[in-house]
Image (spheres, grey):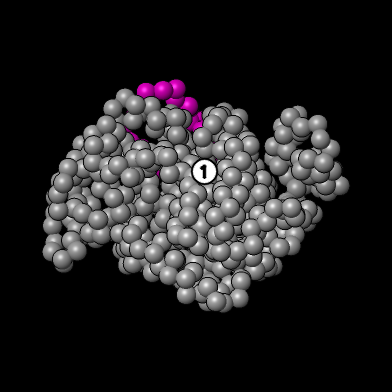
């Protein structure tokens, strides 16, 4: 079931909300170890102190005075024992105030997985959220008038904007568009984290014919939802795809830039082999154009994507124009843990350690990035097009930025919600009492063209993404039409 599987990876990449004015939300007690008020308060103080000292710039979107006020209010409200799941939820709301995707405490995946395996029930609804409102992207319940593209107006009597705002405070996101995308894909799990299991939700909505309905939507367990999921969505064989769309246009869906199929997610072996086989096949088929589909791609690392780019790059490239690192004890501790697993003095962790040794905590330095080299002995010589959407995240955004900024090809689709220039290179520290792991960005990563504005990648050729159904049925055809029309145009960035 793709949505249940991809959830766990989507959460590794996720609010504009004044949390200090909110009451602490505590669902029904979770049966597990409870941490005392003293333990929680000690950890909360350690949490804020270490985050401020370690993050590249914790206050670049939320001022220090605002954060200080939120901290004082939140600390005072810790007045009862909490379980680990509850503590994570409470602390994450504070982390999310940074409005930075890489400042976060990850969703309690294991607890949620156990809940689902026990037959736990969730709202079988996923949304497409934008400035126009919240629309049904998928509904995995018994057939009803609640169908794709219906617009929600109220949930349990609350206006949908108010209802969503409550859920947004659990998400770390750099902007509204990114938060909308993350929230829409995680409605069932966010509701579980917010309020536990519920029997049903009252939903008022307007259907595609303009008629208003109000219905009771029961929650369902995983097996019950399974029977309502279309076979195409339930087929995980489509994680990575390569084929010829016609006699001239090759199609490559590289999938996540990590090894999602095995235990060691950073093992590049299978991915590199898949990419090599795909391009060799395209060359054998004499493909004149290649469409690389990065829609809905959660990202990963450039140790995967550079091998893909090297097949059609015509000059050396870097994933960033500048990689500016802040020195902190937490960053050095994280790096030291990696040193224990590497004996190669050229390894990035060894290079970082050398720079850390030359600087004081709180200082920053530009880390020199090596050039990635094109494949000189095996290269795809046709035109390249990259297809993106608002759900292209993390390293997928970096790939699109490299293609666009270096002129390696033409970017199609819609603007990414995730940023090309961003605070990233996540490190972690652990809270001493609860053991909660906190992620923080140690660096400012500037996109290849040097633009320091926090912005997504805009397509060279925008395509229409009018609805969920449009995204599924028509975008690929639109892309093929653009490719065909541009066949006589210059190789890169054809319009």
Instruction: Examine the image and state in which quarter residue 213 appears.
Output: bottom left
* Mark 1 residue crowding within 10 angstroms, few (<14) / some (14–19) / many (20+): some
Query: Residue 493 versus residue 381: which sits nearer the camera?
Result: 381
Query: Residue 67 versus residue 393: which sits nearer the camera?
Result: 393
- The image position of residue 73, as x and y in percent, is 48, 48
In the picture of the structure, the residue carrying the numbered disc 1 is 12
Tell me which segment is drawn in magenta: 23-45
- The image position of residue 136, as x and y in percent, is 27, 55
Q: Is residue 300 shown to the viewer in this render?
A: no
**Residue 332 colored in magenta in the image:** no
Taking 211 as reference, is 115 above or below it?
Answer: above
Which residue sits at x=36%, y=60%?
471
Taking 20 as reference, is 474 above or below it?
Answer: below
Which residue sits at x=19%, y=40%?
218
- The image position of residue 48, as x and y in percent, is 59, 44
Which residue sits at x=74%, y=52%?
377
Quadrant into which the N terminus falls: top left
Q: Residue furthest right?
A: 358
Taking 472 as reference, is 260 above or below it?
Answer: above
**Residue 31 colored in magenta in the image:** yes
Instruction: Examine the image and state in which quarter residue 323 appears.
Output: bottom right
Secondary structure category for the residue under label 1: loop
Q: Is residue 129 left or right of residue 400?
A: left
Which residue sits at x=61%, y=71%?
492
- The image position of residue 141, as x and y in percent, is 21, 43
């Amino acid at each position: 079931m793709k949505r249940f599987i991809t959830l766990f990876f989507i959460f590794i990449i996720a609010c504009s909300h004044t949390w200090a004015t909110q009451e602490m939300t505590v669902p029904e007690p979770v049966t597990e170890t409870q941490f005392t008020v003293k333990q929680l308060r000690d950890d909360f103080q350690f949490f804020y102190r270490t985050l401020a000292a370690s993050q590249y710039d914790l206050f670049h979107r939320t001022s220090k005075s605002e954060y200080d006020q939120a901290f004082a209010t939140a600390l005072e409200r810790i007045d009862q024992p909490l379980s680990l799941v509850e503590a994570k939820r409470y602390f994450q709301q504070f982390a999310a105030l940074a409005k930075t995707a890489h400042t976060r405490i990850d969703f309690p995946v294991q607890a949620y997985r156990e809940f689902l395996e026990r037959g736990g029930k969730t709202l079988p609804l996923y949304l497409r959220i934008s400035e126009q409102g919240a629309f049904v992207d998928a509904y995995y319940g018994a057939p009803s008038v609640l169908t794709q593209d219906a617009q929600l107006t109220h949930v349990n009597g609350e206006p949908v904007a108010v209802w969503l705002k409550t859920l947004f405070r659990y998400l770390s996101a750099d902007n509204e568009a990114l938060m909308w995308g993350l929230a829409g894909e995680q409605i069932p799990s966010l509701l579980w984290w917010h309020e536990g299991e519920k029997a049903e939700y009252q939903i008022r909505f307007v259907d595609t014919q303009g008629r208003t309905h109000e219905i009771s939507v029961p929650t369902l367990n995983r097996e019950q939802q399974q029977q309502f999921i279309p076979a195409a969505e339930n087929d995980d064989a489509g994680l990575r795809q390569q084929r010829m769309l016609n006699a001239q246009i090759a199609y490559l869906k590289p999938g996540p830039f990590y090894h999602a199929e095995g235990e060691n997610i950073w093992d590049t072996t299978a991915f590199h082999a898949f990419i090599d086989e795909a391009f060799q096949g395209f060359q054998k088929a004499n493909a004149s154009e290649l469409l690389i589909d990065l829609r809905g791609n959660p990202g990963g690392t450039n140790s995967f994507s550079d091998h893909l780019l090297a097949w059609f790059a015509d000059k050396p490239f870097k994933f960033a124009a500048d990689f500016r690192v802040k020195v902190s004890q937490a960053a050095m501790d994280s790096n030291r843990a990696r040193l224990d697993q590497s004996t190669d003095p050229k390894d990035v962790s060894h290079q970082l350690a050398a720079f850390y040794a030359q600087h004081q905590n709180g200082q920053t330095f530009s880390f020199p990035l090596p050039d990635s080299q094109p494949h000189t002995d095996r290269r795809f010589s046709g035109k390249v097009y990259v297809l993106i959407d608002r759900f292209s995240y993390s390293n997928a955004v970096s790939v699109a930025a490299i293609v666009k900024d270096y002129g390696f090809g033409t970017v199609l689709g819609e603007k990414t919600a995730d940023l090309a220039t961003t605070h990233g290179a996540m490190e972690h520290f652990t809270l001493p009492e609860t053991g909660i792991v906190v992620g923080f960005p140690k660096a400012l990563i500037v996109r290849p063209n040097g633009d320091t504005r926090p912005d997504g990648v805009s397509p060279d050729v925008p395509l229409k993404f009018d609805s969920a159904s449009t995204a599924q049925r028509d975008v690929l055809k639109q892309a093929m039409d653009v490719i065909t029309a541009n066949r006589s145009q210059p190789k890169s960035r054809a319009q």
